[in-house]
Amino acid sequence: MMKDNYAISRGRMVSTQIINRGISDERVLEAMRKVPRHRFVEEAILHQAYNDHPLPIGEKQTISQPFIVAFMTQSLELTGEEKVLEIGTGSGYQAAILAELAYSVYSIERKSVLAKMAKDVLQSLNYYNVYIKIGDGTHGWRSEAPFDCIIVTAASPDVPLALKEQLKDGGRLVIPVGDQCNQKLMKITKKGRNYKVEELLMCRFVPLIGKYGFQDER
Ligand code: SAM
C-alpha cells in the first residue's frame, strides 16, 4: 500500500514538476518514475520526498530538487553506454538516476558519513554499477578517466581543469558555476582540443569545497 502511494507521488512529480517544465527525454522521465526518491531522504521528512524543492540530508547538505536532477541528467544526453563521473554523491539519488541511464557511474563525496549512507542505500536497491569514493572531487578520478560525462552537483567558483581534462573527446560536463549564492549551470562539450561552452539556467547549489573549489563552508 505504502509502495503504491509513493509510485503515485512519483508519477505526479514527473508530470507536474518535470514534464510541465519541458523535460522530454523519455529515458530520463522513466528513470525519474522508477527510482524511489523517498529511500534517499531521512525518515522524518519522508512525506516531503516528492516535493518540488531540495531537502536536507544531514551534514548541512541537500538532495537536489527533482527538476534540477532531471534537467542536469537530460543535459548529459545519455544513451546507456556511458562511463559517468559525478562529483558530490550526497544522498546517492542522482547516482541512482544515472545508473539507470548509463553503463557505469563513478561518484566522489567528501563527507564520509554521506558516502557510507549512499553506498548502503544504493546497494540495498541493487545498483551494482555505481562506484563511490571519499575524497575531494575537484581533482576528478584520474585512475578511471576518461569519462563520457561528468556531472558536478555542488557550486564551483570555476570549472576545475582536471575535470575538463578527464573528459573524452565529445564528452559533456555539466557544472554550476558562480558564487556561493547563485550560479549558472554550464554545459561544456569537449571537441578535440577545444571546448564548447553553453549557459543553461540559473541555479543554487551548496558549495563545492576543495582544492579547486571554494576553500571552506560558510
Ligand atoms: N547529488 C546529490 C544527491 O543526489 O543527493 C546532491 C549533492 S549535494 C547538493 C552536494 C554534495 O557535494 C554534498 O554532499 C557535499 O558534501 C559534496 N561535495 C562538496 N564538495 C565536494 C568535493 N570537493 N568533492 C566531493 N564532494 C563534494
Image (tube, grey):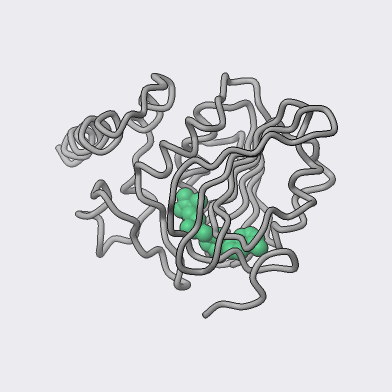
Please indicate, yes or no, whether residue 116 appears anywhere in the rendered image. no
Q: Residue at x 64, y 70 (%)?
A: 214
Q: Position of residue 157 (x, y in %)?
A: 63, 63
Q: Which corner quadrant of the figure contains ligand 1?
A: bottom right
Coordinates of residue 70 in the picture (x, y in percent): 41, 36
Q: Residue at x 79, y 41 (%)?
A: 166
User: Is residue 25 in sight in this rendering?
Assistant: yes
- Left or right of 28, for residue 47: left
Residue shown at 39%/19% (left/top)?
A: 26
- Corner quadrant of residue 207: bottom right
Residue 168 position by quadrant: top right
Return the residue nearer the eye: 14 or 45. Answer: 14
Name the one closer to the observer, 193 or 59: 193
At horizontal 70% and vertical 62% (from top left) the residue drawn is 135
138 is higher (above) or lower (below) than 195? below
Frontmost residue, 3 versus 66? 66
Q: Quadrant of the N terminus?
A: top left
Q: Position of residue 5 (x, y in %)?
A: 16, 38
Most foreground residue, 203 or 92: 203
Count all numbered tags in the image, as a single digit: 0
Residue 73, image x, y percentages:
49, 35
Q: Is residue 212 above or below residue 215?
A: above
